[in-house]
Amino acid sequence: MRKSKRLDKIPPYLFVKIEEKKEELTKKGIDIIDFGIGDPDLDTPAHIFKEMHEVLETKGSANYPTSKGEFFFRKAVSKWYKTRFNVELNPRDEVCALIGSKEGIGHIFLAFIDPGDIALIPDPAYPVYKVATILAGGDPYFLPLTAKNNFLPELDQIPKDVLGKAKLLFINYPNNPTGAVAGLDFFKKCVGFAKKHDLLLISDLAYSEMGYDGFRPPSVLEVPGAKDVSIEFHSLSKTYNMTGWRIGMAVGNKEAVQALATIKSNLDSGAFKAVQLAAAHALTEPQDCVDEHNKIFSERRNVLYDGLTSLGWKFEKPKATFYVWVPVPKGETSPSFTEKLLEKCGILVVPGNGYGSSGEGYVRFAITIPKERIASAISRLKKHGIKY
Ligand SMILES: Cc1ncc(COP(=O)(O)O)c(C=O)c1O
């Protein structure tokens, strides 16, 4: 058997290693407090389940869907964008359904990157941006996100020769893994930059509904003229605790949306129609469940933030996402501190450098466990004398 060379360029998916380590310790009888993968522990809201049950009782969902999504789903997405962001989208050609946004993010690179092309991607970042660039034969150019630059890429630092080969600029706010947020001013700058340098601006908006303390994350498409150069990825995974349902959407510039749809039509046959029906229901019904989830996540964030600051930590309290990006104490590295937390305290976090070299010096806590467990983690840190 002779595998492709591109396979050698792909590092093992970050969470595979972490899950293996967790399994090993659990087998030894250790109670692990798991802040690892960002998979919501809360249930999908009951009204969405009910809709799914009803849809499954009726016939008509069993056939192949269309790969770019059924028209009713694309219409629901368009309505949601209008209500939530006051952004107009034509459901015919400015919206495409996805089998989760990971699928669309993975495929968009095939539509825009040829061998030798550059994709401008943040570092640290959701690992798929880098890997999908490599799979398409392109080269990632990393834009460091640091506390110094408020975890926003410094676009004016990108060298001219890099810009000459770059075709895509990827941004993700609210951000995984840093929990950082961006406002419309920054988005406006990105749109202007993309226009000036003939780039496709790709916004990953997976966490837009997880804002706290009154913060409502904006969409890039709210910037006037953004649709000329931008595509945005979104998903129902985090908004409605539907990670396993696999449903998301790409919206925005019609040429970009159609290019993605062309790749998809050749590689997949779309999301299960019943899931699209339930998802359309989720998007168009009242959104009280989102506020309820956010209340729970913001309480958890407070428990973790207050606990860590009581132990000497100093960092910005995140305004969005369910991630807390925590600097490691002096003398530690991301991997050494991750190991220490796991071995000494049975606390599982993700080493920041797993998201890119600029993530070194941090660990990521995903607050996808009850606040009582978070409080126990703080007690364990105290007990073992771990502080900043
Ligand atoms: C930044 C970011 N984008 C996209 C995704 C993909 O989500 P999904 O494929 O479930 O829509 C994730 C998942 O964790 C993420 O963190």
Image (tube, grey):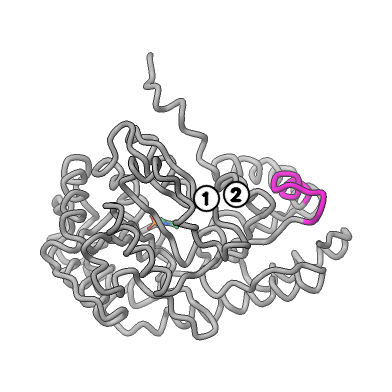
Looking at the picture, how far across and down is residue 191, in whole percent?
32, 64
Q: Is residue 53 magenta?
A: no
Question: Which of 112 and 387 lies nearest the eye of the viewer?
Answer: 112
* Coordinates of residue 111 in the picture (x, y in percent): 24, 43
Horizontal side of 83 relative to 309 (left or right) equals left
Residue 311 position within the rendered picture, expressed as x and y whole percent measured from the top left: 82, 69
Q: State which region is magenta.
A: 329-340
Are dots 1 and 2 in contact, CB under 8 Å? yes
Q: Nearer the viewer, residue 313 or 37?
A: 313
Label whose residue precedes the other's in the sequence (1 or 2): 1
Q: In the rendered view, would you say 207 is above or below 34?
A: below
Mark number, residue 358: 2
Q: Amino acid at mark 1?
A: Asp
Magenta span includes 335: yes
Locate the C terminus and report the quarter of the image it occupies: bottom right
**Residue occupying the point 26% across, 76% down:** 80
* Extreme residue toward the front, this view: 160
**What residue do we see at 31% from left, 57% from top?**
194
In which of the image's four quarters is ligand 1 placed? bottom left
Residue at x 29%, y 57% (from the top left corner): 196
Q: How far across and down, in percent of the image, does residue 154 sit?
A: 49, 58
Determine which of the numbered discs, if any, sits on residue 13 in the image.
none
Secondary element at image label 2: helix
Indicate the quadrant containing the N terminus: top left, top right, bottom left or bottom right. Answer: top left
Looking at numbered disc 2 in the image, what kind of residue is underneath it? Ser
Dot 1 corresponds to which residue? 123
| Whether residue 298 is visible | yes
Mark 1 C-beta closer than 8 Å to ligand 1: no
Q: Does 58 sit above or below residue 364?
A: below
The one nearer the camera, 32 or 247, is: 247
Instruction: State the CA–CA distance, disc 1 to disc 2.
Output: 6 Å
